[in-house]
Image (cartoon, rainbow, N blue to C red):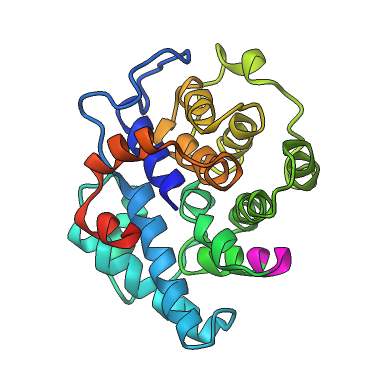
Amino acid sequence: MEGAFIGDIVGSVYEWKDHKGKRFPLFAPGCRATDDSLMTLAVARAFQEAQQAGKLLEADTVLPLLAREMRRIGQKYPDAGFGGKFRYWLFHPEMGAYGSFGNGAAMRVSPAGWFASTLEEAQQLAVLSCQVTHNHPDSYRAAQAVAGAVFLARQHRTQDQIRTYLRPYYPLDFRLEEIRDSYQGDATCSGSVPQALESFLEAKDFEDAIRNAVSLGGDTDTLAAIAGSIAEPFFGISEQILEEGRKFYLPEMIQAVK
């Protein structure tokens, strides 16, 4: 989960700034934890409670827990960068899922890859994590791609093997150097998740995955959160980066990683 946290924090200061290139301070002034970190934490909390109850894959248990945890932490940090419709959902408990195909489905899904004991479970949990808000086929596809990649990284699969898993979800028929200058980015799943996945697939270590993602510009905190969430189990995170990154954690994030 810390891979998503640190990617989010590093990318936060470059979001929509049209930064292009891999040379930048990893933890620059103004870095912060955003909605990407908070909702990842909320999903992890909900899955943990469901697992403890022996009902991790039961929608009747998991969905109310997801809604409760997202609203609980989201309402505490309303200025964390939430999209308008999601922010409305946070403060209106009567509101149900609203068919979003935004990349929020993918930036918060990494706990599915950690709590799952099989690839199929990771895919099931990915869909559950979407259903409280992002109940759209594009969101399901993105979340399953990311959660499956996290799970496979935990199983010590190679980057080529993970790429093979991802191809039915996205063609991934580009290289970062081919799109960097022209990529404008958007906050949809289809317009950002393939680029985040490729950022991991071309990386040589955790830091490189984050730098790849930020180098594209656009929704950099989410791109880096997704790339970082897969890079963490694949490469590990250096103690130096963890030490620096944790300085930006919110209290709930610190508590979660103790």
Quadrant housing residue 248: top left
Indicate the quadrant containing the C terminus: top left, top right, bottom left or bottom right. Answer: bottom left
Q: Which residues are magenta?
A: 118-123
Q: Is residue 91 among the parts visible in the rendering?
A: no
Q: Is residue 3 among the parts visible in the rendering?
A: yes
- What percent of the width, then of the height, locates residue 169? 74, 47
Residue 216 in the figure: left or right of residue 162:
left
- Seen at 72% across and 67% down, the residue is 120
- Seen at 29% across and 59% down, the residue is 88
Q: Is residue 88 above or below residue 247?
A: below
Residue 96 in the figure: left or right of residue 35:
right
- Seen at 61% across and 26% down, the residue is 204
Quadrant housing residue 164: top right
Q: Is residue 108 above or below residue 244?
A: below
Counting every numbered tag in the picture gives 0
Q: Nearer the viewer, residue 237 or 67?
A: 237
- What percent of the width, then of the height, locates residue 21? 47, 13
Secondary structure mostly seen in the magenta stretch: helix
Considering every residue shown, the one lying at the far front of the view is: 239
Magenta stretch holds residue 102: no
- Seen at 69% across and 20% down, the residue is 175
Q: Nearer the viewer, residue 132 or 33?
A: 33
Residue 201 in the figure: left or right of residue 16:
right
Q: Is residue 135 above or below residue 218?
A: below
Q: Is residue 76 above or below residue 213?
A: below
- What percent of the width, then of the height, locates residue 19? 40, 16
- What percent of the width, then of the height, locates residue 45? 38, 69
